[in-house]
Structures are given as C-alpha cells and as structure tokens.
Image: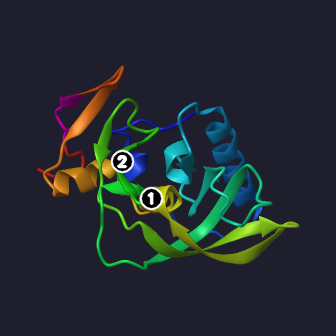
Amino acid sequence: MIVIYPDPRLRVVAQFAGWDQEAERVAEKVGRELQWAKNGIGLAAPQVGEKVRLFATKNLQLAGPRAPKLELVINPQFQPLDQKVYPYHQHGDHREPFLEGCLSLPGLWGAVKRHLQIKASWQTLQAGKLVDREAILTGLAAIVFQHELDHLDGILFIDHIRQANGKVYRLEGNRQIEVPLPADDRLTD
C-alpha cells in the first residue's frame, strides 16, 4: 500500500542499501506497488513505508534499450549538467510546462524547477549482485530521477513549490484548478 501524505514515514531519510534479504523484500514491495499504480512512473521505498535507499521506475530505460520494464535504482546520486533549473521539459525545440505529481499526494500537481540534464549514478541488480550504473539523463527521465531521489531524502515535490512560492493544482478534465498548498507538516511548535 502506498503511504499517503502527511504520513511521517515520507519524511524519513532512507539508509544506504546493500543487497540482502531485507533490501530484496523492499524492492519487491516497491516494484509490486508501482506496477499496479495507474499514473505512476516512479516509486521510492519511503512511499511504501520503508527506509531503504532505493526506488523503481517504469520504462525510463535507465540502463539502455534492453532494460526491464521496471528499473530498480539503488543508492542513487546525480550531478547536474546544467546549472539552471526549469519548471518544464524539452521536446526537441519545444518547451512544455511540466506539472509534477506524486502517488503519495494523489490528485495534486505543480511546477517544480528541476535540472533537465543530469549525470546519474546508481546500483542495480544483475544476476543477484549489485552492479554500478551511470547515465546521462535528460527531460522526463532526469525529472523522475530527481523526484524519486528527493523521496529518499524525505523531500516532497510540494516542498519545492512552497519554497518557490508556487502553486498547486488539481486537474479536472482539461482544466487546472488552483488549490491551497497542504500544510507544512515539517513545521514544529
């Protein structure tokens, strides 16, 4: 079951993952939930209540054209290859606004400034062993990688929107209806 905001488990910083039975159990849980998620293209371990530093993505082909439909990303890191951050993604010469959403905040969308080109590194499972991967990710793949990595650090997309004084929307048909940002669950008395 996917953890829904404001569950405090979404704010836990995930721990470095070696490959053992616990990591395997978490990876299976993340993969199973992501496969059943209709509108999700990525899911991180904290979103299923786990503290392991891994996430899975659908069809982003992080490892190349023969990658499985679900790519397991363990201990991810990235370096931006562009210094600017953008609230859109690029389709050839055309820039298209990108409203980011999250399975843990169902129905909410907002523009988040992200790097559109990153050098990503991670580990994945191959023949039962962790192997290192590295790739230049652009556009949607870069956005998803950054979004899921944020989850591993207890950061949600609404945090970026709040910091930028941005807006959050609900989509109704083809219309975007502005709604109030959820309360900041990280504020203390």
Q: Nearer the viewer, mark 1 or mark 2?
A: 2
Mark 2 neighbour class, 10 Å CA radius: few under 14, some 14 to 19, many 20 or more? some
Under circle 1, the secondary element is helix
- In this rendering, position of residue 8 left or right of residue 185: right
Q: Residue furthest top?
A: 173
Across and down, in percent, residue 88 comes to: 34, 54
Q: Are marks 1 and 2 in contact (CB under 8 Å)?
A: yes
Residues 94 and 20: in front is 94
Please name the colour scheme applied to the rendered image. Answer: rainbow
Q: Is residue 19 visible?
A: no
- In this rendering, position of residue 155 left or right of residue 50: left
Disc 1 designates what residue?
Answer: 143
Residue 182 lies within the magenta run: yes
The quarter holding residue 121 reads: bottom right
Under circle 2, the secondary element is loop
Q: Is residue 5 visible?
A: yes
Compared to residue 10, the image places residue 12 above or below, namely below
Across and down, in percent, residue 86 comes to: 30, 62
Residues 42 and 176: in front is 176
Disc 2 designates what residue?
Answer: 98
Residue interval drawn in magenta: 177-183
Q: Amino acid at mark 2?
A: Phe
Q: State the residue at coordinates (43%, 39%).
A: 104
